């Protein structure tokens, strides 16, 4: 059984930092693309792919987080991390970990979380940034 367990969410003030972790099990972690999605409050909020990292270490960042967030993975610990610096109130969201055998960008964009066809998804961790 595939499990993705996120941790590290918290309430912080604007300008602060957090590091999210996602511990994975039930699949060959080193061969999977891993990533972080977020969905803010509201029924029409976008399910945004924040960042992803491929099996070979190639990374993607949404424009909204470039230069502030860093994704990394430790294949010896089956864990993917998201270091979030210079946090802004608009970063407030539930952050979900995802795993995929194909690039996460191929699942497209929308308001449905998780995106259709994306099978491996964590329960999420809340990040709240106050101004």
Image (spheres, helix red, strand yellow):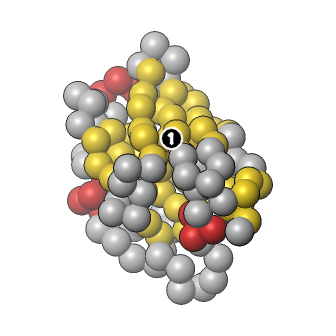
Residue 90 in the image: x percent, y percent? 57, 70
Question: Vertically, is 76 above or below 67?
Answer: above
Q: Quadrant of the N terminus?
A: top right
Which residue is located at x 47 percent, y 70 percent? 47
Task: Please indicate, yes or no, whether residue 98 appears anywhere in the rendered image.
Answer: no
Query: Could you say which quadrant of the image residue 116 lies in?
Result: bottom left
Residue at far right of view: 11
Foreground residue, 5 or 71? 71
Foreground residue, 113 or 14? 14
Which residue is denoted by mark 1 in the rendering? Answer: 82
Give the number of callouts: 1
Circle 1 — which element? strand
Badge 1 density bin: few <14, some 14–19, many ≥20, Cα 10 Å:
many
Question: Vertically, is 45 above or below 92?
Answer: below
Which residue is located at x 68 percent, y 40 percent? 8
Residue at far bottom of view: 44
Foreground residue, 8 or 77? 8
Residue 88 in the image: x percent, y percent? 58, 63
Q: Quadrant of the C terminus?
A: bottom right
Which residue is located at x 35 percent, y 60 percent? 62
Question: Vertically, is 102 above or below 109?
Answer: above
Residue 14 in the image: x percent, y percent? 66, 60
Task: Please indicate, yes or no, whether residue 12 appears anywhere in the rendered image.
Answer: yes
Foreground residue, 10 or 47? 10
Which residue is located at x 36 percent, y 54 percent? 66
Residue 82 in the image: x percent, y percent? 50, 41
Q: Is residue 10 left or right of residue 68?
A: right
Q: Is residue 11 left or right of residue 107?
A: right
Question: Vertically, is 98 above or below 50?
Answer: above
């Amino acid at each position: 059984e595939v499990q993705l367990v996120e941790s590290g969410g918290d309430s912080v003030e604007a300008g602060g930092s957090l590091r999210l972790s996602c511990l994975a099990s039930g699949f060959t972690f080193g061969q999977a693309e891993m990533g972080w999605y977020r969905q803010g409050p509201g029924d029409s909020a976008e399910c945004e792919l924040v960042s992803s990292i491929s099996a070979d270490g190639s990374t993607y960042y949404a424009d909204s987080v470039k230069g502030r967030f860093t994704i990394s993975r430790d294949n010896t610990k089956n864990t993917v991390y998201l270091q979030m610096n210079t946090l802004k109130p608009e970063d407030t969201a539930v952050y979900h970990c995802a795993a995929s055998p194909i690039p996460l960008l191929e699942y497209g964009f929308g308001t449905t979380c998780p995106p259709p066809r994306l099978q491996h998804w964590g329960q999420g961790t809340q990040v709240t940034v106050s101004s």
